[in-house]
Amino acid sequence: MPPKKNRLSAASLSRIALAGFVLILLIATHLPPKSRLLPPEEHGLDKVLHFSAYATLACLLATAWQLAFGILTGRHLRWVWCAVVVFGALDEITQIPVGRDCSIWDWTADAVGAAAGLCAFVWLRKRITVRVNEAQ
């Protein structure tokens, strides 16, 4: 019998991706405003970055939860959205000590991005389900 290979499951990989993304997000949002690691402030680009980051965060969180525990219902998705929105608010508030702005508009972009990320998650889940059912 061949030796068993250690492979990470999709659920484990999704949790690792989620944890890594949260870590990168927290580091990036708490760098001082003049840090060379941050992109230059372009008109409107900041809100696009907030939207994209929180869309990604919501999608990763929903994916990790679903792969670990099964199909998410609408109620579960609302909890994901609430968790991401609260995380966004706390992230904004904790930027104050490092000299960054705490902006209601950044938080709004976070909340809208989280909703868009969950819509993308649901859409992709339906597409994958259809493809799996067609293959059977």
Image (cartoon, grey):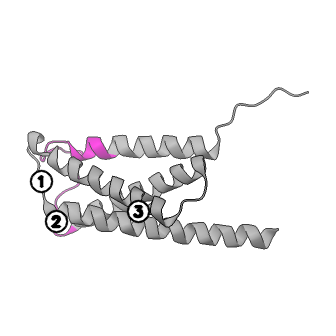
Which amino acid lies under the numbered mark 2 shown in the image of this protein?
Trp
Disc 1 is placed on an element classified as: loop
The 10 Å Cα crowd at callout 1, few under 14, some 14 to 19, many 20 or more, is: some
Identify the mark nearer the N-term, 3 or 1. Answer: 3
Q: CA distance from mark 3 to mark 2?
A: 21 Å
Q: Please tell me whether residue 41 belongs to the stretch shown in magenta.
A: yes
Q: CA distance from mark 3 to mark 1?
A: 25 Å
Q: Nearer the viewer, mark 3 or mark 1?
A: 3
Disc 2 is placed on an element classified as: helix
Identify the mark nearer the N-term, 3 or 2. Answer: 3
Residue 95 shown left or right of residue 87 in the figure: left
Q: Are marks 3 and 2 in contact (CB under 8 Å)?
A: no
Which amino acid lies under the numbered mark 3 shown in the image of this protein?
Arg
Which residues fall within the magenta stretch? 25-44
Q: CA distance from mark 1 to mark 2?
A: 9 Å
Which amino acid lies under the numbered mark 1 shown in the image of this protein?
Cys
The rendered magenta stretch, by its main secondary structure, is classed as loop
Location of the N terminus by quadrant is top right
Judge by depth and name the residue closer to the eye, 35 or 74. 74
Judge by depth and name the residue closer to the eye, 54 or 85. 85
Figure check: 41 above or below 30? below
Q: Residue at x 17, y 43 (%)?
A: 94
Q: Residue at x 75, y 31 (%)?
A: 5
Q: Residue at x 26, y 45 (%)?
A: 28
Label of residue 78 in the image: 3
Figure check: 47 above or below 63? below
- The residue at the far front in this view is 75
Residue 124 shown left or right of residue 55 in the figure: right
Which residue in the protein does label 1 denote?
Answer: 102
Label of residue 105 in the image: 2
